[in-house]
Amino acid sequence: MVSVVVPIYNEEDLIVQFHAAVANALQSVIEDWEVVYVNDGSTDSSLELLKGLQILDPHVVVAELSRNWGHPGAVAAGLRTASGRAVILMDGDFQDPPDVLPQLIEAWRNGAEVVAGVRRSRQERRKVLAKLFPLFYRVLGFLSDYPLRLNAGLFCLMDRKAVDAVLALREKNPYFPGMRAWVGFRSSMVYYDRQDRIAGEGKLSFMSRIKFASDAIMSFSYKPMRLSFALSGLSLFMALIAGAGVLISANPLTAAALGVGCTVFFTGALLLLSVGVLGEYIGRVYDEVRDRPISIISQVHRPHASMLTTQSDTISLENGSYALQPDGYSGKKAGRAA
């Protein structure tokens, strides 16, 4: 089964049309599928429409949240509800085009365990956001301590192993595109053109987008914290220049002014160095509190029972144990593989 998780918040103008497009796309490539709509505390008729769709289409699953928890909370709830061997995440406003779903499923069938939808182009009628999105991804790419796939948002397919690994992280301020890349597994890309909304307005406020950007940077970058080291070095360099000026200056007033500047810059360098060291320790505390695993096992390959014949011995391998049978001697107590 393939599950499609769609967070919904006040999308009454698009729900019926969107589900028809998703159903048409999935029916053409797979028989067993479901669409998990997560109603994130909608105040319009979205929930009633979703319940009506469920009566008409048994492929519809409706997860109703107790209130509006925000986009990351709705996505997490959808991942916990989905039961498919593969889970597709997408928004319900047609910006993630349903006709790309067969390409994601095909890449998964070909062996990919994480298939990211990468934006080839983006249509956005809000001109400010059209300028800010490319800038954000360039800044994120520069700051991130971990290589993240740029221009890849929520739209993706994850195998069940990847979904379980992401859910195991249990982060309180999740940035799902980064977490998806961090867990690893065999990955692939599908390029698409991101469309503008067909109807309605985006539900994320400007401050919500700022929070989203800060979660992305703070979750996968220590560079802002380590900026104190760079500023400490710059301040120390300025102190050295001012100190040299004191030594070569012939004017006592100028020398005194440079001496004060040297003292200020040197003191600032020490303070910034102390802040940087403190920040390193705080970062390590943050790692411990976040409790991400230090590694994730994709698959364990164990030996099957088989017989190996050498020139002098016959070795029987059974789930890691071995038995040597030289010159008619037999017995499994001959040894055990480490």
Image: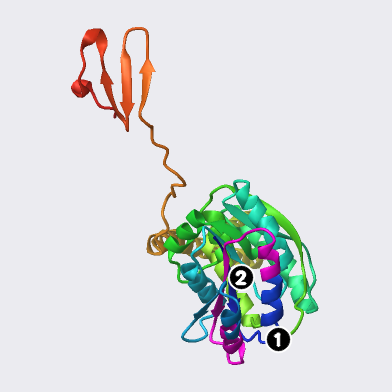
Q: How far separated are the C-alphas under marks 2 and 1? A: 28 Å
Determine whether, in the image, residue 170 is placed left or right of residue 329: right
Note whether residue 232 is visible.
no
Query: Which residue bears the numbered disc 1?
Result: 13
Give the secondary structure at mark 2: helix
State which quadrant residue 154 falls in: bottom right
For label 1, the SS is: loop
Question: Foreground: 199 or 99?
Answer: 99
Q: Position of residue 14 (x, y in %)?
A: 70, 82
- The magenta stretch is 23-51
Q: Is residue 140 left or right of residue 337?
A: right
Residue extending furthest toward the bottom: 44
**Residue placed at 41% from the left, 58% from the top?**
284
Magenta stretch containing residue 271, yes or no? no
Tell whether position 28 is magenta: yes
Q: Position of residue 231 (x, y in %)?
A: 58, 61
Taking the spot 22% from the left edge, 9% from the top edge, the residue there is 328
Which residue position holds label 2? Answer: 213
Please tell me which residue lies in front, 243 or 50: 50
Q: Position of residue 267 (x, y in %)?
A: 50, 64
Residue 145: quadrant of the picture = bottom right
